[in-house]
Amino acid sequence: MRTTQDARFYAISRKLEEPFANEGKTLVVQYAVKNEKKGGSFCGGGYIKLLPSSVDQDKFGGESPYHIMFGPDVCGYDVSRVHLIFHEDGESESSSRRSTEPRGALD
């Protein structure tokens, strides 16, 4: 997805053809994001969410329920974090790690 306006939320979703289960198996979730705008005033992020099959695709947005949310937050020159949130049965467990890599490693 290429966005055209700064300081705006964008969202897309796609339903899997078939539900999957990873019980007893390792699940790997990965993707690439490139934040092209640089500078001290830039703040942005890009997240991927694993959604339950019950999500209404026509009403998908930031408040839609999810099982896993993962992605980077980049703000200015000195704040870069990767967020990971697991959500199940109304409970959330989150982890946020500040990047120890030089600026650009999360771009």
Image: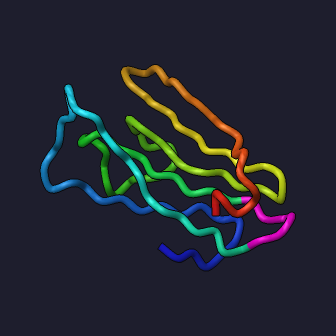
* In this picture, residue 47 sits left or right of residue 39: left
The residue that appears at 66% across and 59% down in the rendered structure is 105
Q: Position of residue 37 (x, y in %)?
A: 72, 74
Q: Residue furthest left?
A: 18
Q: How is the image coloured?
A: rainbow
Quadrant that contains the C terminus: bottom right
The residue that appears at 83% across and 59% down in the rendered structure is 77
User: What secondary structure do most residues of the magenta stretch adopt?
Assistant: loop
Relative to 38, say whether 25 is above or below: above
* In this picture, residue 37 sits left or right of residue 3: right
Relative to 51, say whether 13 is above or below: below
The residue that appears at 32% across and 55% down in the rendered structure is 57
Q: Position of residue 96 (x, y in %)?
A: 63, 35
* In this picture, residue 57 sits left or right of residue 91: left
* Corner quadrant of residue 4: bottom right
Residues rendered magenta in the picture? 38-43
Q: Position of residue 19 (x, y in %)?
A: 16, 44
Is 101 magenta? The answer is no
* Corner quadrant of residue 41: bottom right
Q: Residue furthest front?
A: 101
Q: Position of residue 94 (x, y in %)?
A: 55, 28
* In this picture, residue 14 sits left or right of residue 62: left
The count of marks equals 0
| Viewer-closest of 93 and 11 | 93
The residue that appears at 82% across and 59% down in the rendered structure is 76
